[in-house]
Image: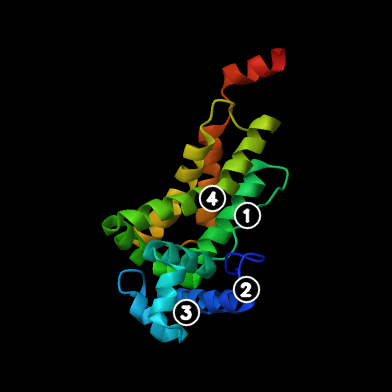
Amino acid sequence: MNPPSTAGTLDPRTQRTREVVLRATANLLAEAGFERITIEAIAERSGVARSTVYRNWPDRAELLVQGWELLCAEPVRPDTGSVAGDLGAIGVELADGLANCDWGRAVSSLVGAVANDPDLRRAMQLVGSRRRASLSSALTRGIERGEVDAETDVDAMAELFAARFFYRHLMTGGVLDDAFVDAQVRAVIALAAPSSATRRRSASG
């Protein structure tokens, strides 16, 4: 993922400096996690003066969030024509990221960090809501196609789908394989499927 764009608002030297700092932050997050990262360490890794880092990111939490987003791949936004296909594609990417990518290895430190840093927690809640948007969109399309009950809280259902991936990764150490993804897809579809009464109303309407 590329650093957050500020094209047209910063001169090229400042933009390059920000990109170097963000790359250094992402690399440190992958290596050490959130709680042990300091502005001093970021400045040393990037070769950018500490005062310059503070001038561009007076809020440490915002720098860490931007570094985290750089570390993570852009989430997939599939539109396969079915809820099962969309959730399956998103689930495969999520499982692979947690199991094999740098951000998956850093996520345990993120949990500890947000518990102790209200500013970071608020910033990460916003990031999380944006990343759940692909799940919510898939479920919304399912409502439009009649695959998902019209009264489903799509944001809550998206959170439910993703939550067990993180629980298994962080708490039980279970395998995040295709069988696990398929089971999660089936479970959410069963919970979100239109009830008999809803199907009758749709058919009569």
Which quadrant would residue 29 be assigned to in this image?
A: bottom left
- Residue 75: image x %, image y %? 59, 58
The residue wearing badge 2 is 11
Of the residues tagged 2 and 3, which is closer to the observer? 2
Up the image or down, 177 lies above or below 136; here it is below
Q: Nearer the viewer, residue 168 or 74?
A: 74
Residue 54 is left or right of residue 151, and the answer is left
Query: In 3D space, how far apart are the residues under numbered discs 2 and 4 (Cα atoms)?
Result: 28 Å
Of the residues tagged 2 and 4, which is closer to the observer? 2
The residue wearing badge 1 is 89
Q: Nearer the viewer, residue 116 or 141?
A: 116
Whether pointer 1 and pointer 4 mark residues with C-beta atoms closer than 8 Å, the reply is: no
The residue wearing badge 4 is 130
Of the residues tagged 3 and 4, which is closer to the observer? 3
Mark 1: secondary structure = helix
Residue 70 is left or right of residue 171, and the answer is right
Mark 4: secondary structure = helix
Whether pointer 3 and pointer 4 mark residues with C-beta atoms closer than 8 Å, the reply is: no
Q: What residue sits 63% from the left and 54% below the top?
A: 89
Q: Residue furthest left?
A: 116
Chain-order first, disc 3 or disc 4:
3
